[in-house]
Image (spheres, helix red, strand yellow):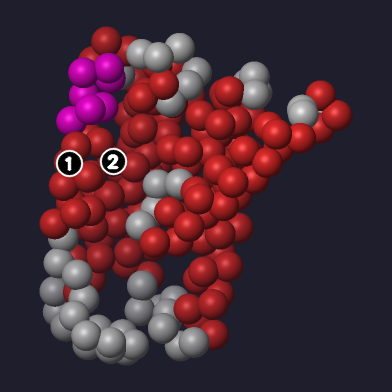
């Protein structure tokens, strides 16, 4: 397939991947660039989404390993967040499969808005402290609630892009 793509398209895809990787490293959401870019090549939606998720898996795994080596990440400390995220993402994916397309078209902008508001206005850590937070009785519940809710909301747009065959912002254009 690469022989069918001209050099300028490969350069644009490479730059898009670089920018998306930077966005993912800083705040997440680089897939909003890579998925439309892959779809613009004419790739089937499931291939574009799978390619994006594979790249995100390697990026997240590399980041987690780097944090672990620097002792900024303790798997046991974050186990509640892991299980909450796994359950929330699974529930969000399963829910999208049973909801009607019309309802999803109305609900997804609200979900994306809520996720954007949380991203912008959630409390940011202060200082240059590279230590894990102190354990407290509220920490497991906070990890569970954040993992469940954020993964649930993030699973919805991914499944909707697969359901519609392209990402929502591009739907009105193409």
In the rendered image, residue 158, in percent from the top left (x then y), is placed at 42, 34
Residue at 50%, 18% (x, y): give it: 165
Q: Is residue 112 above or below residue 42?
A: below
- Which region is colored magenta? 104-110
SS label for mark 1: helix
Q: Which residue is mark 1?
A: 114
Residue at 60%, 58% (x, y): give it: 58
In the rendered image, residue 95, in percent from the top left (x then y), is placed at 32, 29
Q: Main secondary structure of the magenta part?
A: helix
- Residue 73: image quadrant is bottom left
Left or right? Give the position of 19 relative to 140.
right
In this view, the residue in front, 47 or 116, is 116
Q: Residues within 10 Å of mark 2 (few under 14, many from 20)?
A: many
CB atoms of marks 2 and 1 within 8 Å: yes
Q: Is residue 97 visible?
A: no
Q: How many marks?
A: 2
SS label for mark 2: helix
Q: Image quadrant for the N terminus? A: top right
Left or right? Give the position of 64 relative to 76.
right
Left or right? Give the position of 16 relative to 111.
right
Q: Residues within 10 Å of mark 1 (few under 14, many from 20)?
A: few
Check residue 51 in the rendering and tell me which mark sits there, or answer none.
Answer: none
55 drawn magenta: no
Q: Nearer the viewer, mark 2 or mark 1?
A: 1
In the displayed image of the protein, which residue is found farthest to the front? 8
In the displayed image of the protein, which residue is found farthest to the right? 3
Check residue 153 in the rendering and tell me which mark sits there, or answer none.
Answer: 2
105 drawn magenta: yes
Residue at 51%, 61% (x, y): give it: 60
In this view, the residue in front, 163 or 11, is 11
């Amino acid at each position: 397939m690469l022989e069918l793509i001209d050099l300028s398209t490969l350069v644009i895809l490479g730059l898009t991947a670089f920018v998306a990787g930077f966005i993912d490293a800083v705040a997440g959401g680089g897939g909003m660039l890579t998925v439309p870019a892959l779809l613009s090549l004419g790739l089937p939606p499931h291939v574009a989404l799978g390619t994006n998720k594979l790249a995100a898996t390697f990026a997240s795994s590399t980041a987690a390993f780097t944090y672990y080596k620097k002792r900024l990440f303790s798997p046991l400390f974050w186990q509640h967040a892991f299980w909450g995220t796994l359950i929330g993402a699974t529930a969000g994916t399963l829910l999208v499969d049973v909801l009607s397309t019309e309802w999803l078209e109305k609900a997804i902008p609200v979900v994306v808005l809520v996720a954007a508001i949380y991203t912008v206005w959630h409390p940011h850590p202060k200082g240059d402290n590279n230590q894990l937070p102190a354990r407290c009785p509220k920490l497991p519940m906070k990890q569970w609630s954040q993992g469940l809710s954020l993964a649930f909301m993030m699973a919805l747009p991914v499944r909707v892009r697969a359901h519609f065959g392209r990402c929502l912002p591009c739907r009105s254009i193409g």
